Each structure stands twice: as structure tokens, then as C-alpha cells.
Amino acid sequence: MHDFITLSKLLFKSNYKLDLHSKKGKQSLIVGFVVFLCLLPSLGMFYMLFHSAFSTLNLDLLILQLGFSVIGFLVLWIALFMFPSVFYFSNDLTHLLVLPVSPTMIIFSKFIIVYISLFLTSLLVTAPMLAAYIIAGAKISQIFMFILQLPLISLAPAFMVGIFWIIVLRFIPFFQNKDRFNLITGVISIVIAVGIGAASGFMSGTSVEDPAALISMLQNNPETLSLLTQIFFNVPFASKAIVNLSIIDLFIHIIIVIITGGLFYLCSKYLYLISATSVKGSPSKKKAKLKVNHQANPFFSYFKTDFYKLVRTPAYFSNCVLSGLVAPIIMVVVFMALPDIEEAKAALAQIDITKLINLPLYLYLGGMIVGFFFGSLNGISATSFSREGKNIPFMLYIPLDFSKQLAAKVSLGIFFSLLSCILLLIPVHMLLPYPIYYDAAFVIGALLASLVVNFLALLIDGIHPKINWEDETSAIKNNLNVVFEFLASWAIVVILCVPFFLFNIFDYLIYYTIFVSIVFVILIVIMYIFGPKIILRSLKKGS
């Protein structure tokens, strides 16, 4: 038992970088605290939702089942991507197998790492749900039974996901390549996210249109929604154990966890090590045959090289390019799935929007907002130097001016940021009939914001790049520069927007927009002039 605890602590520190005696561990703790603060509004929203349901509807069993089902889907979503990362692609198995511990101990130590993440994630729903249940008048015994379910509710889905991946990676070698796996799961995540977005858009439109009908459906036909909870076979027993104070249902839930845990143990014992030892990481880098064109512009050649590296490396493509495109695609699909979209289009077709408002101004402001959001989302510029890794000294000595290298790198981030922004013009044109040349204002605003965000991201990553990494995925994952860039970008937005709302200067919107634009231009010029010098000095000192 002592060896199991020691190994679990070692893997915990290795995976979560929470060694408080190190600089990275302290940084991870600070980032975690900031993320928790950012999640507080979501926790409050969940509390209000559950409190309203428990207080208004006399359907505690169904509400608990729906809440636990949400946790099940959340656990399923995270575990589908986290389990292979920890069990197969962490590159620590060869080091662990030589230790004087059994393979079973290694397997369950790794499972503990996955379970801790899933349990903490499940608390985002269970904590506000429990608080709402208490305020709504739950009995002490029901509260105690609820607390007993907290560590159990995410165990069965976690075990089932583990069984799924062990079988898949054992009998389908196609998925045993890390880059191929990341690319395929990245595409699948977009498909699932788009499906969820479409469904949520349809449901939200329906509930807004007639909320009384939605409440009536819950009260009169609870069996309809109860069918959805049957997907996770442990949820009904966990809910009945709380509402009915049923010891039998509690034991059944525990038995389900034990059975799924036993199946996971058998699969991992006989199938895991065979497939895990044959998993391939990123393929060894082969020098590609490049066609050298001595008359080509060096800047465009450098940009083209970085572009191909970004889109042809599956780890970079899935984590930088695809991740930045998910949000706008979901927004477009959700908008198109709204039930009343056709009626709204017909009504707005009768209105000349250009005569009612200063449309170019609002498009310009909209472009700036989405430019800041999507520019800070993809992480392309925020990992520009981290992706170079040990090749950074090569950048310092190639016969191309360093400022032009930086311009090529920041242009790559701006290109994909603008691509995400322009996708949002699709639903805007579907809803509002206006001349297409007005979109130039939107593009200019998005370009200005993207320049600020990407220059800032390049500066942050250039000052402190993540150079030491084993493969391309680790150059992107757990890279704090992406978080720092996101926080710094939105700190600028908050600083500039607070005076507008604080002093209620809406009547002077056009003048304030000009002022903000001038501030952005000044920031861009400062970073363009002094950024290369600061980054070059930092890289030389680091190398």
C-alpha cells in the first residue's frame, strides 16, 4: 500500500506539475486558482438553475437523475481524451516497468490520476446541486446519502471509458500512433461539439419560446426525460438512494462500481501492457525534400515553412488550428438551428438596418470583440517559439532578419484568427440583409484586435518559451504562455471597457471607439519596434 501511495504521488506531481517547491509548481497553482475564480459565475448559474428546479417542481428524483446524467456526459467527454493521454501517450511506462512494483499497481496509480481530474470536474455540477438541494429543504439523512454518492458517481463511467480504450487500442493498431490519434479525436470533438451546439440551440429556442410548456412537460411527462438518464445505468440507483433513502439502491450502485472496476482490472491485466508498449509517439522527424527556389521571397518562404509545419503536424493542427475553429463553427450551427430563424429573417428583411443604426461602427466594434476572443483562443502565436524547441538557436543564425521571422510568425496567428472571425459573418448575413462591402469595417476591427493579441502572445512566448519537451503535443499542452496571453489580452479589454460603462458615455461611442483604436495602434507600433529587440535578447540569454 505504501508503494501504491508513493507511486500515485509521483505520477500526480509529474502529470499536474504541482511540486510546490518548484517554480512551475507554484505557477500551476496560481493558474489553477485563477481558473477557479473564472468558474465562479458558472457555479452560481448552476446553483440558481438547480435551486429553481428543486423549489418550483416536486420532481426531486428526476432533477437528481438529470444532474447526475450531466455529470456522466461531462466525465465521459473528458475521460475519452484524458485516458489515452495518461495511460498510453505519457512516455513514462518504460520508466515505470523497471521499478519494483507490479503492473497492477502501475495501472491503478495511473487510474487515480485520471479519477482525480474527473472527480474535481464533477464537483462543478455536484457542488451547486448539493447546495441547492440543501437550501430547498433536504433532510440530513438525504444530504449524507448525497455526499456518499459524490465519489461514486464518476467511477463507473470512468471504468467504462477505460475498458473501451484498452480494447480499441489493443485490437485496432491504427489508433496506436499518437499524432494520428490526436488528429482523429480532434476532428471527432468538433463533430460532437457541433452536434451538442445544434441540440442546445434548438432546446434553448424552444424553452425561450414557451417556457411554460417546458415546465408542463417536466411535470406531466417525467418518463420522457427519465429515459435519457438510462444511458448511465448507475444514475437511477444513485438518485433513488438519495431521495428514498434506500440502502438497497446504494448497495446496487456500489456493486455496479465494483463490477465495472473488476472488468477494468481484467482488461488492463491481460490487454493493457501489450498495447501500451507498442504505442508509437510522434514519428521520428525525417528531413523532407524541399524544392529550393533561390528567387523566392525569404519572408514568404519562412511563412510557408511555418504554415506547413503547423497544419501538417497533427499535434499542432488539432490543438491550435482545430481548437480555434471549434467555437465559431458551434456558434454558426447553434444560430442556424434556432427554431424561429426563418421568421426573424422575414421580419428583418422588411427593415433597412443601415438607416436605423451606424452599421459600420457596430460592425467595426463587433470585429474588435471577436478578434480579441478568437485571437487569444487558438494559441498559435503564444506557442510560436515553444514549437521550435531546441531549434531556437537555428533561428538566431539563419540569413533572414529576425524582425522578418517574427513578422512571419505573427502573420500566421493573425491569418487563423481572422479566419475564425470571418466565419461569424455567415449567420450575420443570414439574419441581416445589408451590402457585403460593409463587412470591411468588421474585418478591419478584427484585424486590429488580432494584431494586438498576436503581437502580445508572440512577446510572451519569446520572453519565456517552453523549450524542453518530449514531443509536439507537450509543447502545446500545459503551456502556461497560452494562459498568460489570454489573461493579458482580456486585461487590456477590461481596462479599456470599464470607463465606457462606468461613466455611461454611450452618446460618445464613435469618439471612444476612435480613442480605443488609437491606443491599439500605439500598442502595435510599440510592440513592433521594441518586441524583436526584447525577444532576441531573451532568446540569446536562454540559449
Image (spheres, rainbow, N blue to C red):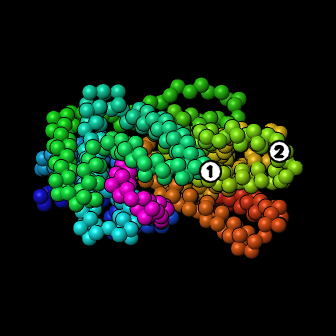
Q: Picture quarter containing residue 495?
A: bottom right
Q: Quadrant of the N terminus?
A: bottom left
Q: Which residue is mark 1?
A: 375
Question: How many numbered discs, if any?
Answer: 2
- Residue 76 pos. (x, y %): 35, 45
Horizontally, residue 295 falls left or right of residue 120, namely right
Type of amino acid under label 1: Gly
- Looking at the image, is mark 1 or mark 2 nearer the viewer? 2
Residue shown at the point (74%, 46%) measured from the top left: 443
Horizontally, residue 370 falls left or right of residue 86, namely right
Residue shown at the point (69%, 66%) measured from the top left: 497
Q: Secondary structure at mark 1?
A: helix
Considering every residue shown, the one lying at the far right of the view is 355
Q: Which mark is residue 351?
A: 2
Residue shown at the point (12%, 47%) measured from the top left: 102
Q: Which span is picked out in magenta?
A: 42-69
Type of amino acid under label 2: Ile
Residue shown at the point (46%, 47%) measured from the top left: 217
| Residue 241 seen | yes
| Residue 395 seen | no
In space, the residues marked 1 and 2 are separated at their CA atoms by 33 Å
Q: Which mark is residue 388?
A: none
